[in-house]
Image (cartoon, rainbow, N blue to C red):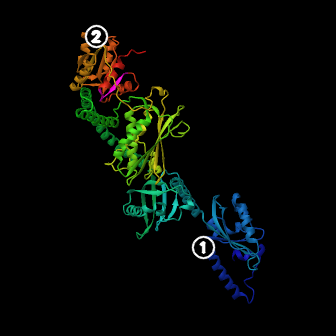
Amino acid sequence: MSHLDKTTGGGKQSSTDGATTGLSPLLHGIRGADTWFEALLRHTCDVVYVLGEDMRVQYVSPSVESVFGYRPEEVVGQDCMQYVHPDDVALARGAYETLATPGSETRIERLRIAARDGSWKTIELAGNNALHDPAIGGVVVTARDVTERTRAERAVERSEGRYRRLVDNLNDGILSLDADHRITLVNPRMLEMLDRAEGEVIGRPVLSLVPEDYRPEADRALRHLRNRPGTSQELRFLRTDGAVIHALVEKTAFTDGQGDYEGSIISARDITARKRAEEENERLRAQVERARRMEAVGRLAGGVAHDFNNLLTVLMGHADMAIAEAAPGCSMHEHLAEIKETAGRAAELAGQLLIFSRRHELCTEPLDCHEVIEDVTRMLRRVLGEDISTALELDADRSIVTADRASLEQMLVNLAVNARDAMPTGGELAIRTSNGGCDYAEGAGGPARDSACLIVSVTDTGTGIDADTAEHIFEPFYTTKDEDEGTGLGLALVFGVAKRHGGWVELETERGAGSTFHVFLPLASDESDARDGAPRREPTGLPRGHGQAVLVVEDEMAVREFIAEVLAEHGYQVSAADSVAEAVGLFREGPGSFDLVLSDVVLADGHGTEISDVLDLMRKEVPVLLTSGHTDRRSVLRLIENGEVPFLRKPFTVAGLLTAVEDALKPVS
C-alpha cells in the first residue's frame, strides 16, 4: 500500500479492505496504478511534497531518500520548516503564504534544506496551490536538488567577478565586440580614455568612436588585426571634447565550432603622451638640426661681416681723406661722396649680417626713434614694392630712447618684411608711434615697468594670423613659410631686440583683417643727452691730438696703416703692433710711454681685452679703446654692452675714429 493511501487530505488515516465483495477488480486496478505511480516518483530526480495548511508534510515522494537521505515515514507529519536553513526560513514562509493564497501562481524559490548527513542541499522549489482540490487538499511542492549547479554557478560568478575586477583594474582600455563589431563590454579605463559614460558606448559600432575621416583606415587596421592575431596596430579614438587619443591596439578574435567569426576583444593602450613626446622630440631634433645649420650660416655671416667691415673701414676712411683734399663742387668731390655713401649702405648690410649672426655689440645711445623710423621708411619704399603703400603717423610727444641704432633699424625692417609677406596682393603698411606706460601693456607678458614707453605700432592690411600661430609667432625657427622661403628668425629677432632694450612686443591680429605689432621701448630718462631730434651729421671740425702716444693693435695691415696715418696727421704719436704678443712686448720695452691703446677685439693670437689684463698686472693705468667688426666672445660682449670698455664699431669714418680717441683719452670724472 502506498504512502499516499495513508495520508489523504488533512493527514487523516484511511483504510481499505481488499476482500470487499464486488470491488476486487476496481481495487486491483487502483493498486496497479498506485504501484506505477510510486515507482515513477521513486526514480524521479525531484522530490514531491504535499503540505497542509499548518505547513506539515502530508506526503513526500520516495525520492526523498535518494536526495536527502530521509525515509518517507520520517518526514511525513513533520513541520517542513525544521528542515529549512535558519537564514532561509523567512523566505520559505513568505513563499508558502503566497502559494497558500487562493488563485496564486506557481512560485520558484531557492532554499537550503538540511540532509540527514548534516549537509545543506540547495534546492529549487516550484509550488502549486491544491488546497481546495478534494483529491489532494494541500500545497504541492516540487523540490529539485541544484546544489552542484549552484556551486558551479557561484564558481562561474566568482570567476566572472575576478575577470571583471581584473578587466576593470587594467591600465589598458578593453572593448568586447560582437560579430558586427558592436560594443558589448567596456572597462572603466576605456571609458576614461574616451571621456564617455558606459551607456554612450555599449551597443555602438566601434568605428563610431574614431574620427570620421579616419574610419576607413581604422576599419582596415581592425581587419588586419583579425587576420593576424598577436599583432598590434595604432588606432586613433575621438573623445567627447574633440581631442584625439592615440592607442596601441591588440585584437583577439573568437570563432564558433565551424570557424565562423563570433566576436573579439580589443585591448587599447593610451600612447598619446608618448606620441606627443615623439613628435616633440622630432620637432626638437629638426629644430636642433636647423639651429646647427643656422649657426653655421651665422658663423659664416659673422666672418664675412668681419672681413667686410675691415675693407669698408679702409674704403670709407680713405674716401674721407680724399674728400677733405678735393675741392667742394668738383666732380671728383661728388664721386668720392657717392663712394662714401655707397660704403655706408654696405656697412648697414654688414650690420644686418651681424645682427643675424648674433655677434652684434649693442652700442646704445640716446636716439630719436622718429628719426630712425623715417630713415628706415625711405629705404623700405624700395624694398616693399610698388603694390604696397606706406604711411607714417608719428604722434608721440616723446620719442627719445636709449638704444642701439642698427638693432632698431633691423627690427623695423623685419617687421616690414613680415608685413609684406602677409600682403601678397598688395596693401598698406602703417607705422605709428604713441606714448604709454605699463598700464597699456598690462598682461603683455613683458616686465613690469614704472617708466613711460614709446610704442611703435606696425600695421598691415594682410591676411591676419590665426590663434594657434599667434601663440608661437615669436619662437625662434617657427615659421609658416616653406623651408626655402623663411628661417623663422625674423620675428624672433624683433622680440629679442625689444627684450635687449628692456621692452617687449604685443601682437594684435584677426584672421582676414590684418595684424599690428606693438613694440614697447622705455623712453630715455634724460632726454637732454639726445640729439634733439636733429639728423646725424659729421662734426664740422675734426678733433686733434696734442702729442699723446697711441698704440694701435690691429692684425689687418690696411686697417692698421689707415688708423696710424689718420692719427699721425691729427696730432698723435703712433706706434703699431699686429698681435697681442707684440703689443705686450712694446709695453715692456717702454713702460709708461703710451697714453692709449686702440686695439681690435679679435686678433690672430688672442683678444684685445688680454692687453688690458696685462696692463692691470703691470699696474699701468692706460685706457684701452676696443674696435671690431664683430666678436663672438660673450665676456667681451658683456664688457662692451655694459659700457665697461670704450668701443668703436667698424666700419668707422675719420671723424668717428678721432672722436672716439678723444673721448677715450678724457680723464674719468
Where residue 112 sits, quadrant-wise, is bottom right
Tell me where residue 313 appears, x and y as whole percent.
27, 29
* Label of residue 593 in the image: 2
Query: What kind of residue is marked 1?
Result: His
Residue 2 in magenta? Answer: no
Residue most extreme to the left = 557
Give 96 or 220, whichever is nearer the viewer. 220
Tell me where residue 420 appears, x and y as whole percent.
38, 48
Give 501 or 127, whichever is nearer the viewer. 501
- The region drawn magenta spans 645-653
Q: Is residue 321 above or below residue 669?
A: below
Residue 647 in magenta? Answer: yes
Position of the N terminus by quadrant: bottom right
| Image side of residue 276 versus residue 17, left or right | left
**The residue tagged with tag 1: helix, strand or loop?**
helix
Q: Is residue 478 visible?
A: no
Give 113 or 468, whichever is nearer the viewer. 468
Where residue 136 sits, quadrant-wise, is bottom right
Query: What kind of residue is marked 2?
Result: Ser
Q: Is residue 254 above or below residue 407?
A: below
Residue occupying image coordinates x 38% and y 55% = 425
**The residue tagged with tag 2: helix, strand or loop?**
loop
> For the residues marked 1 and 2, what is the alpha-carbon distance in whole angstroms?
136 Å
| Image side of residue 538 versus residue 56, left or right | left
Label 1 sits on residue = 43
Tell me where residue 386 appears, x and y as whole percent.
35, 51
* Label of residue 332 in the image: none
Position of the C terminus by quadrant: top left
Q: Local crowd at mark 1 within 10 Å, few (<14), some, or many (≥20)?
A: few
| Image side of residue 393 versus residue 119, left or right | left
